[in-house]
């Protein structure tokens, strides 16, 4: 699908601006030709790009407006995408309970209509939100979702599931499982030059190595992830990698380096919070307090 390819496949500096330009061009064509069917996913894709690049307040307003419009038109399938993208945005902001609320609306619509479209992504992000709230034993059901996506050859959904499983595994204390899922992501990312996906993979590899106290390898993976995240322009990933590098340095007794990474992570968090002014949202980003 157009949204999946444009938003999941950023390869380097400038890809998000190109994706935004492509969505804007598509939107202009759809409006000129009165192609109502194409406008919904195009608007959602454009706002997803805005969220990924840190314009969260603008994206939040745009996605909710598009969802209301889709509901008025009865375009059910695109409502699933809207619910998922809104859920992902809220996950980025640390608003896990609110993310579950919006993702569950997508589930409820699926049950009502019997349509399973986009279900794997919604299931994945629900599992991530619940994991962040401390719920356990989420991996088996999500693994089943992954296998279903594989059988259906839904590549975008497969990627979402694997990434979600990496996070869920690490939260459950399964660093080896997290590393294995990260390796899968890297095997997908590297042949196609998918730099954002590579950054995600290396972030989770680094997090798993940190949990296993393999500090040298964790440093290599997290540093590479941080560089890629900055080049691609994925704001939340930049914050996460800087925070992880801060924890790594702290674990090694490198106080000055830990403070530098912590300061960078907090600056990104502050920029995210600033993007939400007048949006009605307050981010719930949890970062370690600065230590002397």
Image (tube, rainbow, N blue to C red):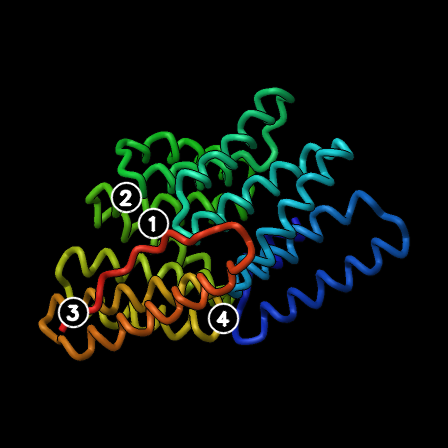
**Inter-mark Cα distance, 1 to 4:** 22 Å
**Inter-mark Cα distance, 4 to 2:** 26 Å
Question: Residue 237's x, y, as percent?
Answer: 40, 63
Q: State which tag comes first along the sequence, 4 or 2.
A: 2
Question: Residue 188's x, y, as percent?
Answer: 45, 57
**According to the image, label 1 marks what residue?**
181
Please report the residue visible at 59 percent of the width from the left and 29 percent of the height from the top. 116
Question: Residue 184's x, y, as percent?
Answer: 38, 52
Q: How crowded is mark 2: few (under 14 residues within 10 Å), some or many (20 or more)?
A: many
Q: Which of 165 and 54 is in front in this view?
A: 54
**Inter-mark Cα distance, 3 to 2:** 29 Å
Q: Do the residues labelled 1 and 2 touch (CB within 8 Å)?
A: yes
Q: In this view, does 245 lie above or below 80?
A: below
Q: State which tag comes first along the sequence, 1 or 2.
A: 2
Q: Which of 72 and 1 is in front in this view?
A: 72
Image quadrant occupied by the C terminus: bottom left
Q: Are marks 1 and 3 in contact (CB under 8 Å)?
A: no
Would residue 98 be found to the left or right of residue 51 on screen? left
Q: Residue lying farthest right?
A: 33
**According to the image, label 3 marks what residue?**
291
**Inter-mark Cα distance, 1 to 3:** 33 Å
**According to the image, label 2 marks what residue?**
169
């Amino acid at each position: 699908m157009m949204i999946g390819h444009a938003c999941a496949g950023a390869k380097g500096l400038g890809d998000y601006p190109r994706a935004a330009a492509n969505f804007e061009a598509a939107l202009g064509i759809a409006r000129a030709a009165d192609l109502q069917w194409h406008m919904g996913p195009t608007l959602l894709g454009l706002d997803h790009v805005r969220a990924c690049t840190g314009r969260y307040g603008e994206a939040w307003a745009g996605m909710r407006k598009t969802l209301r419009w889709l509901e008025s038109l009865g375009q059910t399938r695109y409502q699933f995408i809207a619910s998922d993208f809104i859920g992902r945005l809220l996950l980025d902001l640390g608003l896990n309970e609110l993310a579950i609320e919006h993702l569950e609306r997508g589930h409820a619509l699926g049950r009502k209509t019997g349509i399973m479209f986009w279900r794997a992504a919604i299931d994945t992000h629900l599992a991530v939100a619940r994991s962040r709230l401390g719920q356990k034993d989420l991996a088996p059901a999500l693994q089943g979702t992954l296998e279903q996506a594989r059988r259906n050859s839904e590549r975008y959904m497969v990627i979402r599931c694997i990434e979600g499983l990496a996070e869920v595994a690490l939260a459950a204390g399964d660093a080896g499982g997290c590393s294995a899922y990260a390796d899968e992501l890297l095997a997908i990312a590297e042949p196609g030059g998918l730099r954002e996906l590579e950054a995600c993979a290396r972030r989770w590899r680094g997090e798993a190595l940190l949990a296993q106290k393999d500090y040298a390898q964790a440093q290599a993976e997290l540093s590479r992830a941080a560089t890629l995240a900055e080049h691609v322009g994925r704001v939340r990933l930049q914050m996460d990698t800087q925070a992880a590098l801060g924890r790594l340095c702290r674990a090694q007794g490198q106080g000055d380096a830990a403070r530098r990474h912590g300061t960078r992570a907090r600056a990104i968090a502050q920029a995210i919070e600033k993007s939400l002014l007048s949006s009605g949202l307050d981010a719930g980003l949890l970062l370690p307090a600065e230590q002397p």
